[in-house]
């Protein structure tokens, strides 16, 4: 196949890989290859803006989770309210970490509660259905009445 036909078939791919190489070899020109999903060329300022926005979002989520754990520990929030809320900031939080924030529940009680409800400690809150969340709350209320005020 002649070179011109090959270029026609894969022209965009060849051009894109050449641009990638150029951006990687000459970073001083202000272009960088973005490691994102779309893999696009961006200026360093655009990359920095996106990176800064991602860092700010991550920091705000971590701050919110720390405040939530403190609220659970001090009794300003209950586990039932927290699990019923479907807050996207705790969606990727592990269910074990959330339960450990409740004062009357230690590692052993949390492990037993999760095992009794067929949940893995690494399960994220977003992957626990509403029915399973309610079953977990009911189980905790029945088996650990001392934690009633914190559970809700």
Image (cartoon, rainbow, N blue to C red):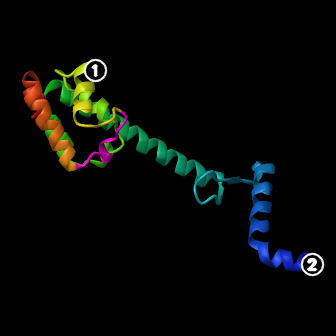
Q: Which residue is mark 2?
A: 2
In the picture as drawn, the residue positioned furthest to the right comes out as 2
- Gap in Å between the C-alphas at discs 2 and 1? 68 Å
Any magenta on residue 92?
no
| Position of 123 relative to 97 (above/below) | below
Q: Position of residue 53 (x, y in %)?
A: 47, 48
Q: Quick check: 48 left or right of 73?
A: right
Q: Name the quadrant of the C terminus.
A: top left
Element at label 2: loop
Q: Quick check: 82 left or right of 56?
A: left
Q: Which residue is mark 1?
A: 107
Residue 77 occupies quadrant:
top left
Q: Position of residue 136 (x, y in %)?
A: 18, 37
Q: Name the quadrant of the N terminus.
A: bottom right
Q: Nearer the viewer, residue 61 or 116?
A: 116
Q: Nearer the viewer, residue 145 or 48?
A: 145
Pointer 2 with pointer 1, Cβ within 8 A: no
Element at label 1: helix
Q: Nearer the viewer, residue 21 or 120?
A: 120
Name which residue lies at 59% across and 55% down. 46
Q: Which residues are magenta?
A: 122-129
Name which residue lies at 24% across and 30% down. 99
Q: Position of residue 32 (x, y in %)?
A: 69, 52
Any magenta on residue 128?
yes
Name which residue lies at 65% across and 56% down. 43
């Amino acid at each position: 196949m002649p070179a011109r036909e090959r270029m026609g078939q894969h022209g965009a791919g060849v051009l894109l890989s050449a641009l990638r190489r150029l951006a990687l070899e000459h970073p001083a020109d202000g272009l960088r290859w973005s490691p994102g999903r779309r893999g696009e060329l961006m200026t360093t300022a655009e990359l920095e803006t996106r990176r800064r926005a991602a860092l700010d979002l991550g920091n705000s989520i971590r701050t919110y989770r720390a405040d939530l754990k403190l609220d659970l520990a001090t009794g300003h929030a209950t586990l039932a309210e927290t699990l019923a809320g479907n807050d996207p900031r705790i969606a990727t939080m592990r269910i074990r970490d959330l339960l450990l924030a409740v004062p009357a529940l230690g590692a052993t009680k949390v492990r037993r509660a999760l095992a009794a409800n067929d949940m893995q400690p690494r399960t994220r809150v977003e992957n626990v259905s509403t029915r399973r969340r309610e079953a977990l709350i009911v189980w905790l209320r029945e088996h650990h009445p001392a934690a009633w005020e914190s559970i809700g």
